[in-house]
Image (cartoon, rainbow, N blue to C red):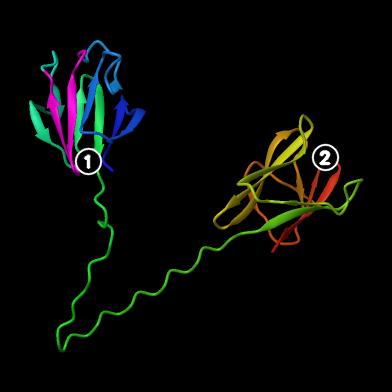
Amino acid sequence: MPRMVVSIDGVVIKEVTFTKERTTVGRRPYNDVVIDNLAVSGEHAVFLMNGDDVEVEDLGSTNGTYVNGKAIKRQPLRNGDTVELGKYKIRFLHEEPGHDYEKTMVFKPGMLPPLAKPAASAPVVLSAAVRVMNGPAAGREVALTKVVTTIGKPGVAVASITKRHSGFVLAHVEGGDFPLLNGSPVGESPITLKNGDRIALASTEMEFVQG
């Protein structure tokens, strides 16, 4: 279905799908799309739908109606056109059904078929966890399912483990004590974690486990 996206200064304020023959736009509250701005007339413009075709018509507005920067009285709209009412922009969108289907390739006698493209490899799903090694929570595992997981004690020492495309990295977040990775303090720069790495933070020892 054709639709309009209304924005001002690049900020989208509403999206409306065309469902009837006439869709009016203006400042008055009885319009289908109300734009409460003095630059917009009480009855500024109307969108007329006939089947899948949509036209915009200016209703004698004070400041005019523009399509792609040109003043119009009435004009058919194409997918991607921008209608301007004062500072407001209305993007007209109408993706035609079936537009995304690939075209059929016809082979003539003697033509070699094109080489098939190699199938795209499935994205690698990274899974990992930290296992607590000491204290009352010893043996507990925390799965690293979020993009960023924080560990430690707020106000004392906090570190983060961030999931990236290439793997997981450990970084210091707050607190006077920096986390230890395999016995060495972590500096200001994030460090990539490897399976079996030992992390010590706020008297808690953990093991990084990557499956």
Residue 85 lies, in percent from the top left, at: 20, 22
Magenta includes 47? yes
Quadrant in which residue 157 is drawn: top right
- Is the residue under label 2 in contact with that under label 1 (CB below 8 Å)? no
Range shown magenta: 41-59
Quadrant in which residue 88 is drawn: top left
Any mark on residue 80, and which? Answer: 1
Q: Residues within 10 Å of mark 1 (few under 14, many from 20)?
A: some
Report helix, strand or loop for mark 2: loop
Identify which amino acid the numbered label 1 is placed on: Gly
Identify which amino acid the numbered label 2 is placed on: Ala
In this view, 50 is above or below 59: below
Any mark on residue 202, and which? Answer: 2
In this view, 181 is above or below 21: below
Q: How many numbered marks are there? A: 2
Mark with earlier residue (1, 2): 1
Report helix, strand or loop for mark 1: loop
Q: Which secondary structure dominates the residues rendered in magenta?
A: strand
Residue 154 lies, in percent from the top left, at: 76, 32
Magenta includes 145? no
Residue 56 lies, in percent from the top left, at: 15, 30
Q: Which residue corresponds to the image point at 15% horizontal and 83% vertical from the top-left?
A: 108
Residue 24 lies, in percent from the top left, at: 22, 24
